[in-house]
């Protein structure tokens, strides 16, 4: 009987871990519940459904004051200035890569240019930024290859409909599990 209780606890721990990795959200267990619950509903059905809409809301809010280089620093500028800690994956003179604090997969890394230089969105890129854009993608590909040998996805959100929530160009490297299609 004790072995069954230990097995049950282990199964719940594994389920909580899998749910957290696939759908990061606050997790709580209700008394007597065997499934993780987020705000009263099963985690998988509620957190995954709401995480996308939360991101869309953040994107709408961020788009209201679409930053230019003269606007206040973004959260990424603060990470670059070491005002906010980050788990650094790569850095060189041109770009900086770190783990996303709200991962959408077991691997979720953001690759950003060190200097915004007007590059708040991909659609606002200038001809003279072609080399920088290529470098960001090469670094993203190297990170993906190293951390996700079975495959990965590169994503660049642009504007309100692209659900861009930080107006400092950034490349997402997402992987570590089977991704689905179509995304969003």
Image (cartoon, grey):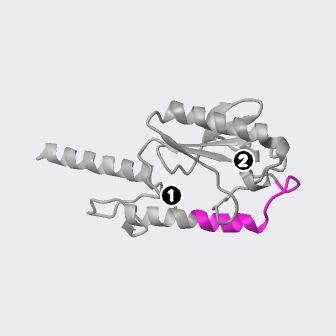
Task: Read off the magenta span.
Answer: 55-72
Q: Nearer the viewer, residue 122 or 6?
A: 122
Please give the name of the residue rendered at 39% of the width and 53% of the height, measured from the top-left corner. 19
Of pointers 1 and 2, the one earlier in the residue sequence:
2
Judge from the rendering whether residue 127 lies leftward or rightward of residue 26; answer left or right.
right
Question: Label 1 belongs to which residue?
Answer: 183
Q: Disc 1 to disc 2, how far (Cα)?
A: 25 Å
Q: Nearer the viewer, residue 59 or 15?
A: 59
Q: Nearer the viewer, residue 101 or 151?
A: 151
Judge from the rendering whether residue 81 lies leftward or rightward of residue 148; answer left or right.
right
Please give the name of the residue rendered at 77% of the width and 30% of the height, measured from the top-left corner. 93
Q: Residues within 10 Å of mark 1 (few under 14, many from 20)?
A: few
Q: x%, y% of residue 79? A: 71, 43
Q: x%, y% of residue 107? A: 50, 41
* Relative to 42, residue 111 above or below: above
Q: Quadrant of residue 39?
A: bottom left
Question: Label 2 belongs to which residue?
Answer: 76
**Name of the residue lying farthest toward the right:** 70
Q: Is residue 125 highlighted in magenta?
A: no
Q: x%, y% of residue 27? A: 42, 58
- Tell me the element at label 1: loop
* Relative to 17, residue 25 above or below: below
Q: x%, y% of residue 121? A: 74, 54
Q: Is residue 65 highlighted in magenta?
A: yes
Please give the name of the residue rendered at 47% of the width and 54% of the height, measured from the top-left corner. 24
* Relative to 48, residue 131 above or below: above
Disc number at residue 1? none
**Name of the residue lying farthest toward the front:** 127
């Amino acid at each position: 009987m004790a072995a069954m209780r230990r097995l049950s606890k282990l199964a719940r721990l594994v389920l909580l871990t899998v749910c957290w990795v696939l759908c990061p959200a606050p997790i709580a267990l209700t008394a007597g519940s065997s499934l993780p619950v987020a705000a009263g509903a099963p985690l998988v059905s509620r957190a995954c459904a709401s995480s996308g809409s939360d991101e869309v809301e953040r994107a709408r809010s961020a788009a209201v004051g679409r930053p230019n280089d003269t606007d206040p620093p973004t959260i990424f500028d603060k990470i670059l200035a070491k005002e906010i800690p980050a788990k650094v994956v790569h850095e060189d003179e041109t770009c900086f890569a770190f783990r996303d604090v709200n991962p959408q997969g077991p691997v979720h890394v953001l690759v950003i240019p060190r200097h915004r230089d007007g590059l708040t969105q991909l659609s606002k890129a200038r001809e003279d930024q072609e080399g920088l854009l290529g470098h960001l993608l090469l670094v993203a590909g190297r990170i993906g290859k190293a951390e996700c040998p079975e495959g990965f996805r590169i994503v660049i959100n642009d504007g309100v409909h692209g659900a861009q929530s930080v107006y400092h160009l950034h490349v997402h490297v997402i992987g570590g599990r089977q991704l689905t299609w179509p995304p969003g």
